Image (cartoon, helix red, strand yellow):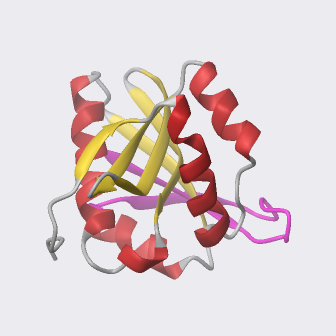
């Protein structure tokens, strides 16, 4: 499914953190702190934001050591989920990673987060392992990867 409105994607800036953090708190099962976002951008990790009409609707943060990268966090505001924005945004991010000589992308996802699992499977990610009791609530994390 293609999004109805063509969004803009750009590199995340420090000024975006408050908006990104607000979305994170609304949608994530295990949300990051605002300080975690700040630290990530200061410590050589990089992120992107998805905007519609200059409003942030999604975000991603990666760390990389070519030829591999890890998706640390990813989210789309609840009002734009299941409309093709997550697929569009993740596809954009993967293409940006290719430009950085990344060949393989890894991520972890809560096994109960079915919406995220569906998106990752549509994108071609495969499960290669799991981490039991990974999250503070004791949930298991699936370990996924994709060759890009």
Percent across and percent down for residue 92 are: 23, 47
Percent across and percent down for residue 137 are: 85, 71
Residue at x 21% of width, y 39% of height:
95
Q: Going by the image, does 71 lie left or right of 8?
A: right
Examine the image and state in which quarter residue 57 appears: bottom left
Q: Nearer the viewer, residue 29 or 130?
A: 29
Residue at x 29% of width, y 22% of height:
100
- Is residue 104 visible in the rendered image? The answer is yes
- Is residue 148 visible in the rendered image? The answer is no
Query: How many numbered callouts?
Result: 0
Percent across and percent down for residue 53 are: 26, 58
The magenta stretch spans residue 52: no
Quarter of the image with the N terminus in it: bottom left
Percent across and percent down for residue 73 are: 55, 50
Q: Going by the image, does 52 lie left or right of 48?
A: left
Q: Nearer the viewer, residue 53 or 80?
A: 53
Highlighted range, magenta: 123-148
- In the rendered view, tell whether residue 21 sits above or below residue 6: above
Q: Going by the image, does 128 lie left or right of 85?
A: right
Examine the image and state in which quarter residue 148 appears: top left
Residue at x 36% of width, y 59% of height:
125
Residue at x 47% of width, y 76% of height:
78
- In the rendered view, tell whether residue 71 sits above or below residue 115: above
The magenta stretch spans residue 129: yes
Q: Nearer the viewer, residue 18 or 34?
A: 18
Examine the image and state in which quarter residue 17 appears: top right
Q: Going by the image, does 33 lie left or right of 146?
A: right
- In the rendered view, tell whether residue 121 sits above or below residue 15: below
């Amino acid at each position: 499914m293609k999004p109805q409105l063509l969004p803009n994607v750009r590199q995340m800036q420090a000024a975006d953190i408050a908006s990104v953090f607000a979305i994170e708190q609304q949608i994530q099962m295990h949300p990051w702190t605002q300080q975690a976002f700040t630290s990530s951008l200061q410590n050589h990790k990089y992120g992107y934001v998805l905007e519609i009409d200059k409003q942030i609707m999604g975000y991603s943060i990666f760390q990389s050591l070519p030829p591999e990268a890890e998706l640390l966090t990813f989210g789309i505001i609840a009002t734009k989920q299941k409309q093709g924005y997550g697929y569009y945004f993740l596809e954009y991010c993967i293409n940006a990673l290719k430009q950085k000589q990344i060949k393989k992308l890894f991520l972890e996802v809560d096994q109960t987060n079915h919406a995220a699992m569906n998106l990752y499977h549509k994108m071609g990610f495969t499960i290669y392992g799991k981490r039991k009791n990974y999250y503070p609530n004791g949930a298991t994390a699936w370990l996924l990867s994709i060759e890009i």
